[in-house]
């Protein structure tokens, strides 16, 4: 009797007779299959928010791999690529709206841009000082 109200007894017939059945439930909230004449929905912003992050991550990894692969003589060039990737992150955070910035958006826009820019310039300064 899980579907009965708590105050309903064994006989729920009232003065008008037995209780009426509940109305049927229509599942209007279920997603419908795509129809041939309908336009496709635009891409999900959550999926597109990964793109700038992955570009910056790929640049940082490329710089580290370049420095490690070619040895200590090329550490400056690898650090330069990492610094460039951080500056790309600063520009992406500055230009993109918050819903597309994804994982690059951790704090306010000004703090994120300043942090990426300062770190990028610092790593580039180290890259210039290395042989």
Image (tube, rainbow, N blue to C red):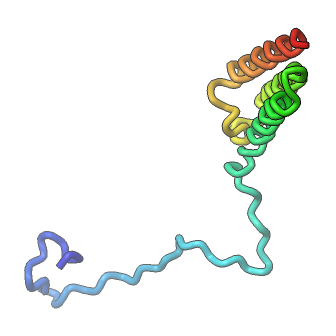
Residue displayed at 65% across by 24% down: 108
Quarter that holds the C terminus: top right
Give the x, y percent position of residue 10: 8, 83
Q: Would you say 113 lies left or right of 18 here?
A: right
Residue displayed at 74% across by 17% down: 114
Pick out the residue farthest to the top.
129
Residue displayed at 69% across by 41% down: 99
Give the x, y percent position of residue 7: 12, 71
Q: Would you say 107 lies left or right of 53 here?
A: left
Identify which residue, 102 or 75, lies in the foreground.
75
Quarter of the figure with residue 16? bottom left
Counting the numbered discs, the total is 0
Residue displayed at 71% across by 18% down: 115
Residue 126 visible in the displayed image: yes
Quarter of the figure with residue 121? top right
Up the image or down, 15 lies above or below 126; here it is below
Pick out the residue farthest to the bottom.
17
Residue 91 visible in the displayed image: no
Identify which residue, 85 or 71, lies in the foreground.
71
Q: Would you say 81 lies left or right of 21 here?
A: right
Give the x, y percent position of residue 92: 81, 32
Quarter that holds the N terminus: bottom left
Identify which residue, 94 or 2, lies in the foreground.
94
Up the image or down, 77 lies above or below 101; here it is above
Give the x, y percent position of residue 2: 20, 75
Up the image or down, 51 lies above or below 73; here it is below
Identify which residue, 15 or 19, lies in the foreground.
19
């Amino acid at each position: 009797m899980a579907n009965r109200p708590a105050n309903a007894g064994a006989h729920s017939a009232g003065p008008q007779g037995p209780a009426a059945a509940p109305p049927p439930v229509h599942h209007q909230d279920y997603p419908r299959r795509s129809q041939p004449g309908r336009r496709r929905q635009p891409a999900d912003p959550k999926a597109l928010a990964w793109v700038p992050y992955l570009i910056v991550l790929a640049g940082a990894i490329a710089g580290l791999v370049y420095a490690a692969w070619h040895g200590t003589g090329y550490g400056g060039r690898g650090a330069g690529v990492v610094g460039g990737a951080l500056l790309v992150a600063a520009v992406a955070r500055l230009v993109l709206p918050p819903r597309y910035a994804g994982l690059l958006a951790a704090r306010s826009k000004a703090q994120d841009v300043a942090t990426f820019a300062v770190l990028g310039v610092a790593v580039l300064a180290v890259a210039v000082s290395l042989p």
